[in-house]
Amino acid sequence: MMNVQIPHATLGAYHSVGPRNQPAWDISHDPQLVKQYGGNNKGVLLLRCQCGQVIRLLGQHVSADGKVAPSLWHDVPQCGWHVWGTLEGWTAGEWDTVVPAGEPGTKPQSHSHI
C-alpha cells in the first residue's frame, strides 16, 4: 500500500463529485454538516477520493504533521482506493474524526472505511 501526499483544495459539497485522480482534502464549516458529523465543532474533514467523490473521514486520527491513521479506504464497488495518506499543508494540529453512532467504522480495526 502506498503513501499518498494529499493536497489541500476547496472542495464541493459533501457527496459531490469532482475530478477523478485528483485526491484533495478540505475542512467544511457548513453548520448542518458540523451539527450532524462534526462532534468537536472544528468542522468536518472532507476528502476527495481518487474516484472523484467528496466524502468525510470517519474514525481517523490526523497527527499534527498531517499523517492520517488508520489507512484511507474508500470501500465501494466502483472505487476501492486504499492508501496511507498525509494531508499536505495541514495546520489544524491533532484531530480525531467523529464516527456517528451506528455508522461503519465504530469498531477498532487496522484500517477505516471512508
Image (cartoon, grey):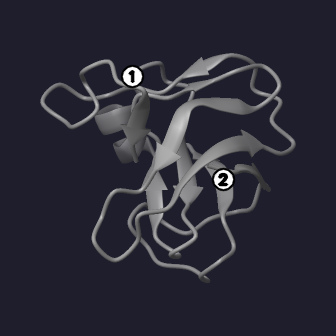
> Which sits in the foreground, 111 or 67?
111
Q: Secondary structure at mark 1?
A: loop
Q: Quadrant of residue 20?
A: bottom right
Q: Nearer the viewer, residue 30 or 63?
A: 63
Q: Residue at x 28, y 32 (%)?
A: 105
Question: Whole-percent x and y of residue 88?
Answer: 83, 45
Rendered image: mark on residue 39: 1
Can I make out residue 37 in this image? yes
Question: Is residue 43 visible from the viewing direction of this image?
Answer: no
39 displayed left or right of 100: right
* Residue designated by label 2: 25
- Which image quadrant for residue 21? bottom right
Q: Residues within 10 Å of mark 1 (few under 14, many from 20)?
A: some
**Residue ID at (56%, 54%):** 47
State which mark lies toward you, 1 or 2.
2
- Count the marks: how many? 2
